[in-house]
Image (cartoon, rainbow, N blue to C red):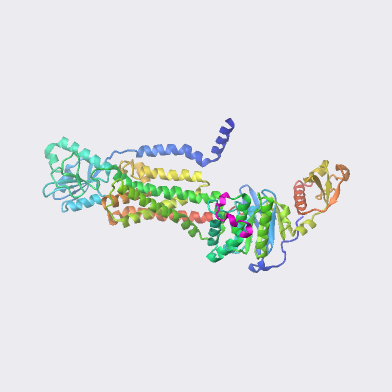
Amino acid sequence: MTGPSHGIGTGPGLDHGPGGWGGTEVSVRYDQGMALDHVSFRANAGQVTAVVGGDGAGKTTLLRVLAGALAPGSGVVHRPGARQTGYLPAGSGIYPDLTVAENLAFRAAGYGLSAAVARERTAEYLDRAGLAEARDRLAGQLSGGMRQKLGVIAAMLPQPELLVLDEPTTGVDPVSRSGLWWLIARAAAAGSAVVLATSYLDEAERAAWVLALEGGRELAAGTPDEIVAAVPGTLRLVTARPGGDAGRRAWRRGGRWRVWEGPGPSGSGVSPGNTASHPGQHSGPDEVITPDLQDAVTIAVLARELEMAGGTA
Amino acid sequence: MWAMIVKEFRQVRRDRRTLAMMIVLPIVLLVVLGYAASFDVPTITVAAAGPQAGSISRLLRPPFDVVTAAPDQGRDWAQNQLRDGKADVAVVTGGAGPAVLIDGSQLFAARATQAALADLEQKVGTAAAAGPVAAVKPAAGVKPAAGADPAVSILYNPDLNTSDIMIPGLAGVVLVFIGTIITSLGVVRERQSGTLEQLAVMPLRPRDVYLGKIVPYFAVAAVDLAIVLTVGIVIFGVPFRGSAAVFGLGALLFLFVTLGIGVLISSVSQNQGQAIQLAVMTMLPQVLLSGLIFPLSSIAVGVRWIAYLLPLTYFNEISKGVMLRAEPLGPLWLPFTCLAVLSVVVVTLATLRFRRFLAPSRVRSA
């Protein structure tokens, strides 16, 4: 159940190449196996693209390829030059033994910003990020959220055409997450093509474009609405985990269970012949609900697992 | 406790490089150092000058080995032979009588010479010993050897002070320490803290990153060197008789090599622990095999070749030559050339390695 194709219209970012920033049929193989398997993706100027997926889905690999830290085994990657690429690696890329201001000064000098521009942007970004009072503190002494914000504004500092952020909000408290998203939105509003990886699907709903990965392969791609609209079958909300085959298509979220019934005759959505689940198997009253992005991605994962299991749900 | 022991064993087993070093390194070091650890000087090289240079060659027996005889040369030539490190001892014949000049900067050779001369005097009696022990007036800065005939003069380190010999070499050890250990840590720290990937994607040329990494250590090492030399001169009274420029050039080349080795180590180390282990592995042979502690001539030939691969061997020659013997650049061409070759090789390898780990990581094609 892949979503629409990757073409998402034209925008200022497409001026930089026939396909904009992104990659086509990109594959990367580590010793442990395929990290990316013929994945295509695109990032448009002025928009946020979210790369979502579970642990080991290939998010970091994809972002490393896009930022130029990792050469793909095959496929084509379109990205601007290093001077126009801002990158927040998984480890934040911040020197813990430098102060906040020193980290930003190093980044500004590395990107060739003039002293005046660096001073102006540093002051502005520190203020926006709420880090102005911490400018003389060692980065290693900052809280996790503050360090992530510092990493984000360091990546934003050159006002790059492409801003690649690897899990900028992971491990960050809700207030800091909100602040980080404000910064990210500002970067996109300023014209950057922002590509970020996140494990939080509620955050991904804010993105203009979402690429869901699973096991290094594309699971779904499109706008959040398109991905949700492409969900086949029915999603039911029940109070207890259903028994039988339906239990394999159920997951807990909040205090209740969601059960996905595919469009096929068996309800698995994979192949005919599966044991049908019916409302009688569920405990308690159930109601059909409209999936959100988190449900849509979960269903996509389930559908792939069932498919790989040969449809014997 | 058992759980802790098991955990430690598992970790050690997975860190194969450390495990290999823990098992193999002691064996290698014991064998190498066993052959190297000797203060005995089997051969004392002699330069003979003056009309009886030929007969001196015939007269002297092992451990003396006359490597050059110049009947038409005098004391200045003989002294230059010592200054330029071509011989440990010079015998000057003619004039008022033969004189023996000993290079005090070759501490163990000088002591062996004193012992051998005393032995020679006892064995062959006055007639045979009369030649080398004829009275000569000691030159300025030259002291007659204690307990020997006044004709025997020790140059460059008249009191045979150990500190005079060690401090020029220790200056090199300080540079090795800064250059190798600290540099290797500085670079591998980037890898461990995850900032190396950030550097790799920034619009920086590998050469800029490499130079940016080593220049601060270069400056620190230069300051350290100045401090060591000042302390050596002021507190220990070590002379600095030669050209500061020649010494500086040698130190510059030597630093290039040691900093390059530090970067090389960092580029093959996954963490600071591994970097320190490797750095110590390169430091230990330099300290023990470079002639700083054991005379090169005392090291077994099978192991001595290692000494000629070590930059400290050449810096040691340069620093002792310049500081103690006022050796000019010309006669030091060999250690300078060897250091230059080593620096080109090491810096090239280090730059290539640096470029490689700053380039986008490569994995297998899908």
Question: On the picture, is A87 further left or further right than A217?
Answer: left
Q: Quadrant where the N terminus of chain B lies? A: top right
Q: Nearer the viewer, residue A8 or A90?
A: A90
Question: Looking at the picture, how far across and down is residue A7, in whole percent?
Answer: 72, 64
Q: Is residue B236 above or below residue A3?
A: above
Quadrant including the C terminus of chain B: bottom right
| In the image, farthest residue toward the right | A280
Residue A296 position, x and y percent, is 77, 53
Name, please, the residue furthest toward the front.
Answer: A133
Q: Quadrant of residue A284?
A: top right
- Which of B315 and B304 lies nearest the eye of the viewer? B315
Residue B103 placement (x, y as % from top left): 24, 46
Residues rendered magenta in the picture: A127-141
Residue B163 located within the stretch drawn in magenta: no
Q: Is residue B241 left or right of residue B25?
A: left
Q: Which quadrant of the view contains residue B65?
A: top left
Work out whether residue A26 can be spotted.
Answer: yes
B319 left or right, relative to A206? left
Horizontal side, residue A165 vs residue B271: left or right: right
